[in-house]
Amino acid sequence: MTLERRKSSWSMQDMLATMDEILTKEEVTQELIQENPTRRQHEMPRNKRNQQNQFERHQQPQELSKISCLFCQSEDHRSKDCSSVTSVKARTQILEKTGRCLNCFSRNHTTSDCHSKGCFRCNLKHNSSLCPAKQNPKPPTPNFGKKENKFTGTTAAASEESDKKDDEGQVYLLTGQARVKDALSKQSWEVTIAVDTMSSLSYIDSTLAEQLHLGNGTKQTRKLKTFGDDEGTNCEFHKVDVELIDSLGKSHKIQIMRNDKLVGKVPSVQLSTKDRKWMKKRQLPLPQGPTEASCKPLLLMGCKELSTILLEKQIKKLPSGLVLMPTVFGPMICG
């Protein structure tokens, strides 16, 4: 692919189209490379190797034409252009059933172990063909202002920080507020949640699980590898069901692991005055979250829940470079 445009002629649409094309080529490469070609060449004599190379060069265009869409198995279009399976949730389920990474579509590792770059639209750890920013229906506008009881230790006020620039290289986890329902009293409580796209499972703080009367559930041993923890440790979990209530009052039931050592403190997004004015001018609701420089989420949602919580509407980039994500629990910010 040649990029011969002059710098002044590039637009955002041109850049997105070019990046889509690059991702498509990477997708084709992943499909074609099933084994290490260098190793295969060393295992055969030179004369046979030359014959093999000639055969591969002759066959390459034919093989390329047989690459099918991962979502509908059609051979006349790429996965990113699929019009048969369009919803993020349906695409995610297909990839999970076929054992593919949700970020690069490889079968050789899980999403949490993927080292490829994430979505170029929202910076989260998923393929751009799974990004809600690519789809733009108009769902009902959530009522972000309605609040209920708050679990002890959490806050719900937007930050009042002014014009403080983010530290260079600082990464902000997608954090926000959500209501969780007490299994016994059916009363809902507002807690701080975070979305960790490097984790395939969802977790809940054991103290909160007890407060919500979620019970012990079924016991499992898994390696816990969360945000800020590169190595991970083997931990014992109890899988329980938890019910979350979104900003429209709709219930979302998910299976979640309770654990005593969920996650450490993560940086809280501090909106600058410029960002807040930009959002106010466009009548965008401010995200509800901790005012402190860091916060300790009590509920950590994994990458499998992204298709459940993200609204399929436009994702916006703030003047500071942070990304405003519309979710069923209200707007959240990451970057």
Image (cartoon, rainbow, N blue to C red):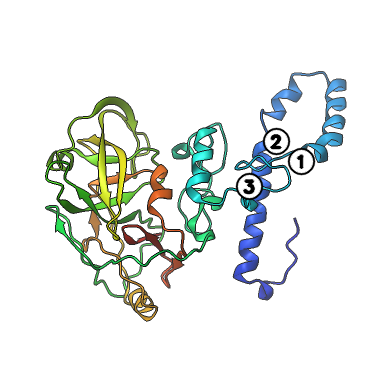
> To which quarter of the image does residue 333 belong?
bottom left
Residue identified by numbered label 3:
79
> To which quarter of the image does residue 177 belong?
bottom left
Q: Residue at x 16, y 45 (%)?
A: 182
Q: Residue at x 26, y 64 (%)?
A: 288
Q: Position of residue 266 (x, y in %)?
A: 28, 51
Q: Position of residue 179 (x, y in %)?
A: 23, 53
Where does the N terminus fall, quadrant-wise? bottom right
**Residue 263 visible in this rendered orientation of the protein:** no
Residue at the bottom extreme, as displayed = 281
Q: Are marks 1 and 2 in contact (CB under 8 Å)?
A: yes
Which secondary structure lies at badge 2? helix
Mark 1: give few (<14), some (14-19) or many (20+) Cα within 10 Å: few
Name the amino acid, label 2: Leu
Is 53 in front, or is 247?
247
- Disc marking residue 64: 1
Name the amino acid, label 1: Leu
Residue identified by numbered label 2:
32
Q: Position of residue 284 (x, y in %)?
A: 36, 73
Q: Is residue 72 left or right of residue 41?
A: left
What distance separates the C-alpha of mark 2 from that of mark 3? 15 Å
Q: Residue at x 15, y 42 (%)?
A: 212
